[in-house]
Image: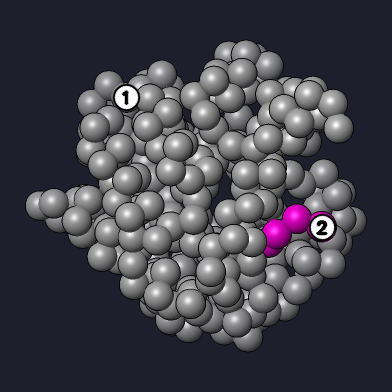
């Protein structure tokens, strides 16, 4: 393998290790809103995630029109923007967390395209990021962003939903890097308290037939019991967002509060 090939696979390889070397039935990936409640506060929360047993982290860059975010995450993003959070500020959080576990940035297409895909991917690489999620990336822009991420050593992680048509699912799965973000339900992110249900196994199983990378399940996973259900359904990873953002928003000591929740979620996956 040449040095260029080593660099181009760096992010995906680090993510793959997080999915296979975690001592759990599935990897735990909490969501962190960069800049909420402050840049320093979000860095402390990220370290608490690692201390609690998280295997990698999804780090959000706040955006003014967050189409995929439910009310809890959207409110945190709005607060971060009001506090003056910038892409550069979130990347300092990435730099601080990257030595502890893989960081996968989550942002919207406009934030990538306004900077230029190559320049944006290079900035993420230089901050130590392992991957990038762009939930609203248009199909026509995807090849250029994928090429930029590949060149920078970032895994471009796509999303699929229960309603994704079979042909599109196969196309997305074939070019997935790092892992395939599989949405458990249609709609936006948010807390749900009922059992995930039998359909989740079908959603995960369908996704697994279309890709060679791990399948991570997100949207609506709130409790250790639901995380365990997701692992039982065959998910290789579990993504938890709104529950943790809410805990951080309501707690006097956000880092301490989220560490307790993450530790319980991690225990549910063992």
Q: Which residue bears the numbered disc 2?
A: 211
* Residue name at image x 84 percent, y 26 percent: 2
Near-viewer residue (200 or 216): 216
In the figure, 153 relative to 51: above or below?
Answer: above
Question: Is residue 214 shown left or right of residue 244?
Answer: right
Give SS at disc 1.
loop
Near-viewer residue (136 or 29): 29
Point out which mark residue 186 bears: none
- Image spot of residue 204 (x, y percent): 70, 71
Point out which mark residue 85 bears: 1
Question: Is residue 59 shown left or right of residue 2?
Answer: left
Name the quadrant of the N terminus.
Answer: top right
Residue 212 located within the stretch drawn in magenta: yes
- Image spot of residue 166 (x, y percent): 86, 61
* Residue name at image x 42 percent, y 28 percent: 95
Question: Is residue 246 shown left or right of residue 103?
Answer: left
- Image spot of residue 172 (x, y percent): 80, 48
Residue 172 located within the stretch drawn in magenta: no
Near-viewer residue (108 or 178): 178
Q: Which residues are magenta?
A: 211-216
In the figure, 203 relative to 133: above or below?
Answer: below
In the figure, 106 relative to 64: above or below?
Answer: below
Q: CA distance from mark 1 to mark 2?
A: 36 Å
* Residue name at image x 62 percent, y 44 percent: 14
- Image spot of residue 221 (x, y percent): 46, 68
In the figure, 263 relative to 107: above or below?
Answer: below
The answer, for residue 128, to whether it is visible in the render is yes
Main secondary-structure element of the magenta-colored stretch: loop
């Amino acid at each position: 393998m040449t040095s260029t090939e080593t660099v181009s696979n760096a992010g995906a390889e680090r993510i793959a290790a997080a999915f296979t070397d975690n001592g759990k039935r599935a990897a735990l990936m909490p969501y962190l809103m960069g800049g909420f409640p402050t840049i320093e506060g979000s860095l402390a929360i990220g370290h608490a995630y690692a201390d609690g047993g998280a295997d990698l982290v999804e780090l959000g860059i706040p955006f003014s029109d967050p189409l995929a975010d439910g009310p809890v995450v959207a409110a945190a993003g709005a607060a971060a923007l009001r506090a003056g959070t910038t892409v550069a500020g979130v990347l300092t959080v990435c730099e601080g967390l990257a030595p502890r576990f893989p960081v996968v940035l989550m942002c919207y297409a406009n934030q990538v395209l306004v900077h230029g895909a190559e320049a944006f991917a290079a900035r993420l690489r230089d901050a130590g990021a392992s991957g990038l999620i762009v939930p609203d990336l248009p199909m026509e822009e995807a090849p250029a962003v994928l090429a930029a991420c590949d060149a920078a050593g970032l895994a471009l992680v796509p999303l699929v939903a229960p309603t994704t048509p079979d042909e599109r699912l196969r196309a997305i799965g074939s070019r997935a890097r790092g892992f395939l973000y599989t949405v458990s339900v249609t709609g936006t992110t948010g807390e749900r308290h009922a059992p995930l249900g039998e359909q989740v196994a079908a959603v995960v199983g369908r996704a697994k037939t279309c890709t060679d990378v791990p399948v991570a399940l997100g949207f609506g996973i709130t409790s250790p019991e639901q995380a365990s259900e997701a692992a039982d359904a065959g998910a290789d990873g579990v993504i938890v967002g709104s529950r943790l953002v809410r805990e951080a928003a309501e707690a006097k000591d956000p880092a301490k509060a989220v560490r307790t929740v993450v530790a319980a979620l991690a225990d549910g996956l063992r």
